[in-house]
Amino acid sequence: MTDQILNNYLSTSVLDESTNRADNDNEVLVSGKSYTNMEHKWDEAFGYLYGAEPDATMPILDQDSFLSEYIDRVEGDADFAGIATTIYDAFKLGRAAIVEKNYSVRDEQAAIIRENVSLIPAVRAVFYLQNGKDNLTADPARAFHGLSEAYGFIYSLQFTRNPDTDAPYFSKTEVDTYLSQLMTGNGFWDVTPTTLDQISDDIAARFNFTTAQASN
């Protein structure tokens, strides 16, 4: 979902593909539909996040077990409160900008979405790394569950998109290095608190938050 939203449908290569911009300027609709192709591409991105909502005009989040759920979790952390509104408002304003043929505003809103949606797997990766660390000795089963969640979120960091560089916040090589560190030796049985803190701090620093902020 994150990859499709950030790197596919909200990319200028998709939004402005072929004659999309000229068609949008001239209000040329998709055959048999009430929207232009550019509007449709933006709506596809919107649907990946809000498609399960009972009323997409008033999203309540946590309506699936994917991105909606985890935006809700991050929103519930006081250190990141407001992120859900920031993302939703950017989707709304960007869509309105397409209707008004204001592509600079459209691209500004796409950048806001990219930055804030990218933050979600980063925060949850650190949350679960710390959850795993805190339970390594007392409750290994719970620790391994947390570390398994962290593994998935770390893997997804290669699909984030930094609007300032138009590249992922973490490269595949960096992600593979972290995953290898988690699985060295007997994997979660051998991983140390020092390693979990180091990976947590690296991720947090890249996104300008602290490990403590994501650990709530």
Image: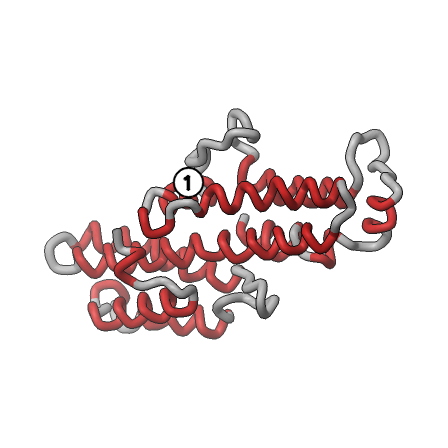
Q: Residues within 10 Å of mark 1 (few under 14, many from 20)?
A: some
The image quadrant that residue 151 belongs to is: bottom left
Residue positioned most to the top: 54
SS for callout 1: helix
Tell me where residue 185 appears, x and y as whole percent: 26, 72
Q: Is residue 122 above or below residue 99?
A: below
Which color scheme did the rendering employ for the protein? secondary structure
| Residue indicated by mark 1 | 69
The image quadrant that residue 126 belongs to is: bottom left
Q: Is residue 49 left or right of residue 127?
A: right
Q: Which sits in the foreground, 178 or 12?
A: 12
Q: Is residue 129 left or right of residue 134?
A: right
Residue in the picture at 40% in, 74% down: 177
Tell me where residue 8 appears, x and y as whole percent: 65, 54
Q: Which sits in the foreground, 139 or 163?
A: 163
Residue positioned most to the left: 138
Residue in the picture at 79% in, 54% down: 17
Tell me where residue 209 appears, x and y as whole percent: 36, 62
Tell me where residue 196 appears, x and y as whole percent: 27, 67
Residue in the picture at 85% in, 39% down: 27
Q: Which sits in the foreground, 102 or 206?
A: 102
Q: Amino acid at mark 1?
A: Glu
Q: How many marks?
A: 1
Q: Is residue 46 above or below residue 14?
A: above
The image quadrant that residue 82 belongs to is: top left
Look at the image and tell me whether residue 145 can be seen.
yes
Residue in the picture at 76% in, 45% down: 38
Look at the image and tell me whether residue 179 can be seen.
no
